[in-house]
Amino acid sequence: MLKPDYPITTPRLALRPFTHADLDALHAYYSDPDVVRYLYWEACDRDATRTILDNKINRTAIHDEGDAIDLAITLRDTGELIGNCLLIWTSKHHRQGEIGYVLNPAHHGHGYATEAARPLLELGFNGLGLHRIAGRLDARNTASARVLEKLHMRREATLIDNEYVKGEWTSETIYAILATEWTP
């Protein structure tokens, strides 16, 4: 089981559980078609964002395979919500997990996604004892690929036209890092 002490802080960020007060900030970027372009869902209306937020609020601990922590990324100096990040325990037997992140585009290009993902790797390797953590993305999402590369994750595969998403075949790129390769 993994139930971190919140908030998880980095030099510039605080990662914390979501609250109902985060609806407007979450909706600001979940409703943006450019933000969700490479994700599995369409831009959300307010009701859909509220439903997503309700699910995020309950994802603060990992008890078993399939569970995730899904955290608000906030600026430490202002408390502004700028994105979200998650760690999923994908396989108990194989000791594997996955990380992900989404940022409000107003905060792209500052290294926040990389800074938020580092503690997730630490939680996965040190908190859950994972052997391998992956990051999966639409192969066209070069900005997200750069984040994973900055985390020293290895590009392992590109699966050509392996998923039908939003009316088109898309390719998926998979990055990963092993516990023996990771350094905090």
Image: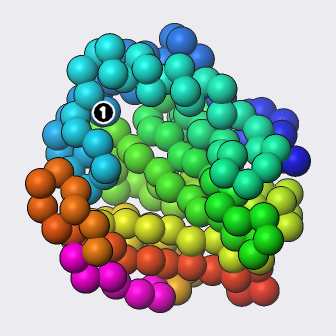
Q: Main secondary structure of the magenta part?
A: strand
Residue drawn at x 83%, y 60% as measured from the top left: 128
Which image quarter: residue 119?
A: bottom right
Decide if residue 2 is on the left or right side of residue 36.
right
The x and y percentages for residue 106 are 29, 39
Q: Quadrant of the C terminus?
A: bottom right
Compared with residue 161, is residue 63 higher up or lower down, i.e. above or below? above
The x and y percentages for residue 101 are 47, 51
Task: Give the colour scheme of this rendering.
Answer: rainbow
Residue drawn at x 66%, y 45% as measured from the top left: 68
Query: Mark 1 sits on what residue?
Result: 29
Compared with residue 7, is residue 165 higher up or lower down, i.e. above or below? below
Q: Which residues fall within the magenta stretch?
A: 155-161
Q: Is residue 160 magenta?
A: yes
| Amino acid at dot 1 | Tyr
Residue drawn at x 51%, y 11% as measured from the top left: 21
Which image quarter: residue 104?
A: top left
Please name whichever residue, 71 or 161, is drawn nearer the observer in this view of the structure: 161
Please name whichever residue, 51 or 77, is drawn nearer the observer in this view of the structure: 51
Residue 12 visible in this rendered orientation of the protein: no
Decide if residue 94 is on the left or right side of residue 101.
right
Residue 170 visible in this rendered orientation of the protein: yes
The x and y percentages for residue 158 are 34, 84
Q: Is residue 102 magenta?
A: no
Mark 1 is surrounded, within 10 Å at the Cα level, by few (under 14), some (14 to 19) or many (20 or more) other residues, namely many
The x and y percentages for residue 27 are 33, 23
